[in-house]
Each structure stands twice: as structure tokens, then as C-alpha cells.
Image (tube, rainbow, N blue to C red):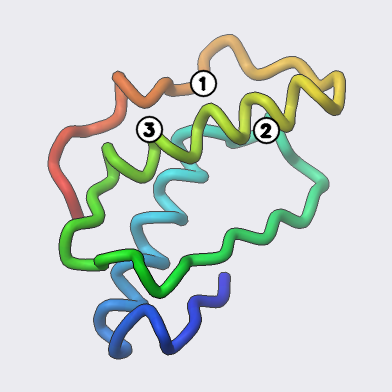
């Protein structure tokens, strides 16, 4: 995962990476396996306000749509954004 320096200092970029990695782990463990996915964190992103719940709310529907477009069924036991922990990282 690569985050641009425009997002913030090293601490902020690492926080964004951790949140996005956890979101991928929860939302799409196998739904998009075998693919390289590029996520671009824009400089308008505020790393201090990013939480796991917000990231999953935005990213999970996109990953599910990708899986559906590729005719790969999403796993029945995959975690939905509502099931994600509500505490931010």
C-alpha cells in the first residue's frame, strides 16, 4: 500500500495504511483475491478523522461491486460495515 506524502506526515500516512489494511481484511478477505487493487488516498483526506467504520462504509460497497462485476460471489460470512468495530484506530 502506498500513501502520498500529500496526505500528511509519516505518522498520519501509517495510520491511514493501518485503517485501510484492516478494512480490506474485514470487507474482502477472498471476494477480490488474485487481484491487484490500487487505492489512492487523496490529499483532502484528513487522517486524524479517519476511522475504521468510515473507511469500511466507503470501501466495502466498492469491493462488493468489484466482486459482483467479476462474477465472483462475495463470501457469505464476510463482515459488513455495520459489523465492523465502531472504535477508530
Q: Which quadrant is home to the C terminus?
A: bottom left
Label 3: how many residues lie within 10 Å, few (<14), some (14-19) or many (20+)? Answer: some
Seen from the viewer's position, the closer of residues 19 and 76 is 19
Residue 57 disc label: 3
Q: Residue 26: percent from the left, percent from the top?
A: 45, 35
Residue 78 disc label: 1
Residue 86 disc label: none
What kind of element bears circle 3?
helix
Number of the front mark, 2 or 3: 3
Q: Are marks 2 and 3 in contact (CB under 8 Å)?
A: no
Residue 30 disc label: 2
Position of residue 40 relative to residue 24, above or below, is below
What whole-number distance in Å separates the C-alpha atoms at marks 1 and 2? Answer: 9 Å
Q: Residue 67: percent from the left, percent from the top?
A: 74, 27
Q: Quadrant of residue 87?
A: top left
Q: Are marks 1 and 2 in contact (CB under 8 Å)?
A: yes
Sooner in the amino-acid sequence: mark 1 or mark 2: 2
Residue 34 vs residue 74: left or right? right
Seen from the viewer's position, the closer of residues 64 and 89 is 64
Sooner in the amino-acid sequence: mark 2 or mark 3: 2
Q: Quadrant of residue 17?
A: bottom left
Q: Which residue reaches farthest front?
A: 44
Task: Write the residue at 41% across / 85% down.
Answer: 6
Q: Which residue reaches farthest left?
A: 87
Sooner in the amino-acid sequence: mark 3 or mark 1: 3
Position of residue 40 relative to residue 8, above or below, is above
What whole-number distance in Å separates the C-alpha atoms at marks 3 and 1? Answer: 14 Å
Seen from the viewer's position, the closer of residues 26 and 6 is 6
Amino acid at each position: 500500500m502506498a500513501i502520498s506524502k500529500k496526505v500528511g506526515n509519516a505518522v498520519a500516512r501509517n495510520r491511514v495504511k493501518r485503517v485501510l489494511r484492516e478494512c480490506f481484511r474485514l470487507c474482502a478477505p477472498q471476494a477480490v483475491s488474485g487481484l491487484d487493487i490500487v487505492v489512492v488516498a487523496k490529499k483532502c483526506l484528513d487522517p486524524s478523522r479517519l476511522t475504521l467504520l468510515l473507511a469500511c462504509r466507503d470501501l466495502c460497497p466498492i469491493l462488493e461491486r468489484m466482486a459482483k462485476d467479476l462474477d465472483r460471489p462475495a463470501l457469505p460470512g464476510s463482515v459488513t460495515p455495520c459489523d465492523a468495530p465502531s472504535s477508530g484506530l
